[in-house]
Every structure is written in structure tokens, then in C-alpha cells.
């Protein structure tokens, strides 16, 4: 039986991966920086360590066959950059994995990460992908579309009565539920593919997503469209007058919401059901 280390199990996707591994009866260890944040249904081996501090993660890969890392900055406010975490922390884990004879690493980047390397988040993630390619290890890079967890921004805006969209709201995206993505991440243990683009089962325009969000919160749809010139001014101002730590996440969203983000469709969970479930909580 394969022994799997999950780094990032305290996060949205990592927690679904942990559940999926346990559902399939695989032996699992998690590497976390705060054990209290781990939501566990069954007993699991836990190593506490800081991926940004190599000595603290020594031995996390001992007797491990496969490492899955979802570690990256999303909403964390630790004063670290994408280069510190998405690149360097994952490099520290890669070095431990190599030292301990791990067979394969599965890493989560971002859809179109290769062509979006002018964005700080993609630059860091794809630099790590380059290191994986040169590492001589077996690996699989998964490049997912936006997660349903991030789509909650629509229901939050709709709940306040107004959704803001870029351009005419006509760009399309197929976001994915963490549980569907976790299935693919765990399948990747046995797959030969080295790179996988993946999105959810439904492709929707941002206008359609906004309408679903208003339906879920039972409010009349009011959408404000941010014109292209204003998006460009915002991007320029953020890059010129704020630090990378601040503008990194914003430049990502201002960029991907202004383009089609389409990946091969996968999974079965719909955004409508996700919004409606969230509305009931
Ligand atoms: N959200 C999206 O729409 C989307 C789309 C495509 C790709 N991705 C990528 O997919 C990955 C997982 O996303 P997610 O939504 O599951 O993110 P998440 O919920 O924020 O989970 C990220 C994980 O990384 C860990 N982490 C972050 N900074 C760390 C640090 N300095 N030291 C140690 N651990 C750290 C977090 O630990 P703590 O719990 O201790 O903070 C958490 O376990 C990320 O790399 C993200 O960029 C996300």
C-alpha cells in the first residue's frame, strides 16, 4: 500500500484530499504548522513543522512513497511572499522528499500558470514546476481552474445587493469543487500524466455566475460592470504603489476575470448546488 504525505491538509483542497485518501484506505501522514487546524475524521499520522524552515520538516518524508502538496498563499497574511511559500517552501519539501527516496510528487499550480508568469503567484508556482522537472523525480503538476471556495465572493457580494464584474461579464470559466478536484489529485498517484489541466463540469460566464449567486441569496440581480480602462488603471496603480504581498492576489483576480479560463471539464458538483448549500448554512 502506498504511503502518502499531504502538505496543505489544513486548507480547502488539502482537507478534501485527506478525506479522499482515507476513503480509499491509503496510509496517510500530514505535514501541518498548526495541528489544531486539522479536521480529522480518523486517526492520521501528523508531523508538525514549518515548510519555510527546513530543519523543522526533517524526517516528514521518512518512509513516504508519494507527496501531495497544496501549500501556497491564498488568504494567509503571514507577511511572506509567493516566492517564500509557493516556491521556496515547496522546494524545501522537494529536497526532503529527494533525501528520503520519495517516488512521486503531486503539486497544485494554477490553470494557465505557464502563460501567466508575469503574475507574482504564477511566477513562483511555475518556478517550482521547473525545479520539479529538473529534479529527476516522478511528478504530476495539476493546474486547476478556480475553486468553488473562491466563488463564495459572488454570494458575499450578492448578499450585500450588488455584484461587481469586469468588462461585460461575458468571459467564461469552469470552476471546480474541492471534492471533485481531490478525486483527480488522488488518482494522479497512479497516472502517468505529468501535467493535468482541470476544471469543473459546467462552463459559465461571470454574468451567469452572478445570477446564480443572486438566486441563492434570494435577491434581485444588480450588477456593476467595471470597464477595461479602469481595470488597467487599477492594475497599474496597485503594481506601482503597493507591495507585492498586497497586490499579488488582486492582480491575479483582475487578470483571470478578464479572460476566458477554460479547462477540460471534470467532476459532477455544480456551482448552483454549492451556492444553494452555502445559502442554507
Ligand atoms: N483557490 C483557488 O481558486 C485556486 C485555484 C487554482 C489553484 N489554487 C492553488 O491550490 C492550492 C490550494 O488552494 P486552497 O484554496 O486549498 O488554499 P488554502 O485553503 O489557503 O490552503 C493552503 C494551505 O497551504 C498552507 N500554507 C500557506 N502558507 C503557508 C506557510 N507559510 N507555511 C506553511 N503552510 C502554509 C496552509 O496552511 P495554514 O492552514 O496553516 O494556513 C494551507 O494548509 C494553492 O497553492 C492555490 O494557489 C487555488
Image (cartoon, rainbow, N blue to C red):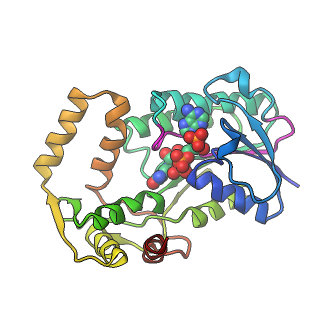
Q: Which residue sits at x=59%, y=67%?
A: 180
Which quadrant of the view contains residue 242?
Answer: top left
Magenta range: 61-76
Residue 129 appears in the figure: no
Specify whether residue 66 is painted magenta: yes
- Quadrant where ligand 1 appears: top right
- Percent position of residue 228, x then y: 14, 52
Q: Is residue 155 left or right of residue 124?
A: left
Q: Residue at x 22, y 40 (%)?
A: 235
Residue 32 in sight from this viewpoint: yes
User: Percent position (x, y) of residue 77?
Assistant: 45, 35
Q: What x and y, as percent, mark residue 154?
A: 33, 63
Q: 193 or 271, which is in the foreground?
A: 271
Q: Is residue 139 left or right of residue 205?
A: right
* Residue sitting at x 63%, y 60%: 182
Task: Name the one closer to the observer, 73 or 197.
Answer: 73
The quadrant in which residue 139 appears is top right
Q: Is residue 103 above or below residue 246?
A: below
**Residue 189 or 202: which is nearer the viewer?**
202
Quadrant showing the N terminus: bottom right
Amino acid at each position: 500500500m502506498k504511503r502518502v504525505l499531504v502538505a496543505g491538509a489544513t486548507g480547502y483542497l488539502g482537507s478534501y484530499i485527506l478525506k479522499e485518501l482515507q476513503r480509499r484506505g491509503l496510509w496517510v501522514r500530514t505535514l501541518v504548522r498548526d495541528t489544531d487546524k486539522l479536521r480529522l475524521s480518523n486517526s492520521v499520522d501528523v508531523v508538525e513543522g514549518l515548510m519555510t524552515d527546513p530543519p523543522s520538516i526533517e524526517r516528514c518524508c521518512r518512509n513516504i512513497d508519494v507527496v501531495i502538496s497544496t501549500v501556497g498563499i491564498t488568504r494567509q497574511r503571514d507577511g511572506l511572499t509567493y516566492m517564500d511559500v509557493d516556491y521556496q517552501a515547496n522546494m524545501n519539501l522537494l529536497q526532503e522528499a529527494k533525501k528520503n527516496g520519495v517516488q512521486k510528487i503531486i503539486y497544485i499550480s494554477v490553470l494557465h500558470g505557464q502563460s501567466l508568469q508575469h503574475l507574482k503567484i504564477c511566477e513562483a508556482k511555475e518556478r517550482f514546476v521547473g525545479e520539479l522537472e529538473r529534479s529527476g523525480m516522478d511528478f504530476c503538476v495539476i493546474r486547476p481552474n478556480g475553486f468553488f471556495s473562491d466563488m463564495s465572493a459572488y454570494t458575499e457580494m450578492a448578499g450585500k445587493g450588488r455584484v461587481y464584474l469586469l468588462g461585460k461579464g461575458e468571459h467564461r470559466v469552469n470552476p471546480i469543487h474541492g471534492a471533485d478536484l481531490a478525486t483527480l489529485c488522488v488518482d494522479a498517484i497512479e497516472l502517468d500524466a505529468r501535467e493535468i489541466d482541470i476544471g469543473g463540469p459546467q462552463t459559465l460566464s461571470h454574468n451567469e455566475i452572478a445570477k446564480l449567486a443572486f438566486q441563492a441569496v434570494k435577491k434581485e440581480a444588480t450588477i456593476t460592470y467595471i470597464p477595461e480602462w479602469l481595470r488597467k488603471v487599477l492594475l497599474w496603480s496597485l503594481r506601482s504603489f503597493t507591495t507585492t504581498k498586497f497586490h499579488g492576489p488582486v492582480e491575479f483576480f483582475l487578470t483571470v476575470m478578464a479572460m476566458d479560463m477554460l479547462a477540460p471539464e471534470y467532476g459532477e458538483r455544480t456551482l448552483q448546488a454549492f451556492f444553494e448549500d452555502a445559502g442554507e448554512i
